[in-house]
Amino acid sequence: MFFIDQLFIQQDHPDGGLPFVGTHVIERVDMETGEKLPPSVNQKILEGSFSTKLTIRCNGNRIRVEGNPSRWQRMDNLFGLTSLDDCIAIYNHILAKYDLPPFTKNTRAYHRQTPDGKSSSLIGNGAEITLIDWTRNHMVDRENELSFIRGMSSVAMGRGREAILKPNGMTCNWGEGSAWEMLKLYCKAFEMQLRLKKYKRSSKTTQDHIKYLETLIDYCEE
């Protein structure tokens, strides 16, 4: 079963008139024609429980949200959300708090106007996903995570891409820095141990939270 982690999504509203959402706005003008361009609005960082974060921005025409909906307001995302509808429902709940319209599905597509000599591209009348991370849990024998990751790091993936093994040996990536696709393999128990150390330093973390994470780490290490 696959889960959804990172999800970046945006939607344009050609009629404009939406409220600005960000931390500051810069008005822009084309210096050659004097035409007023859509304003530039930087992103606003939303902080939730358990050190979770999302970013949101709206320049009056375009709404954009970036983050991990499976992690939002949760201590962990070992088992994340499995459908786009559930993820977008979380984002739409946040948009409503800023009086912004919800992300909607595309019902038709048309060709986007492009400069001369450039190939045409399609654009829909709904939301556009610009990045999505699909995640799947795998199991190996107890205490074999390190050797498994090291072994996999010697295997080339897709078009001969070589893996990059991180110094701690607990993570390797294929296609790191690619704007199209990157594959990542890492030890979840190790990642959660690092997170537990961070939670223990926070005054907001209760003993129940710590016990829950420790139980989850034990489950991952079995």
Image (cartoon, rainbow, N blue to C red):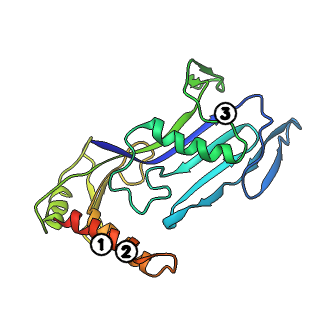
Lateral position of residue 168 relative to residue 67, left or right:
left
Q: Quadrant of residue 107?
A: top right
CB-based contact (under 8 Å), mark 1 and mark 2: yes
User: Extreme front residue here?
Assistant: 208
**Who is closer to the viewer here, 179 or 14?**
14
Q: Earlier in the sequence, mark 1 or mark 3?
A: 3
**Residue 210 tag number:** 2
**Distance between the alpha carbons at the discs numbered 1 and 2:** 6 Å
Label 3 neighbour load within 10 Å: few <14, some 14-19, many 20+? some
Q: Earlier in the sequence, mark 2 or mark 3?
A: 3
Tell which tag, 1 or 3, sits nearer the viewer.
1
In the picture, the quarter occupied by the C terminus is bottom left
Label 1 neighbour load within 10 Å: few <14, some 14-19, many 20+? some
- Mark 3 residue element: strand
Q: Tell me which amino acid carries mark 3.
A: Asp
Q: Tell me which amino acid carries mark 2.
A: Ile
Q: Quadrant of residue 45?
A: bottom right
Which residue is disc 3 drawn over?
12
**Distance between the alpha carbons at the discs numbered 1 and 3:** 43 Å
Tell which tag, 2 or 3, sits nearer the viewer.
2
Lateral position of residue 77 relative to residue 103, left or right:
left
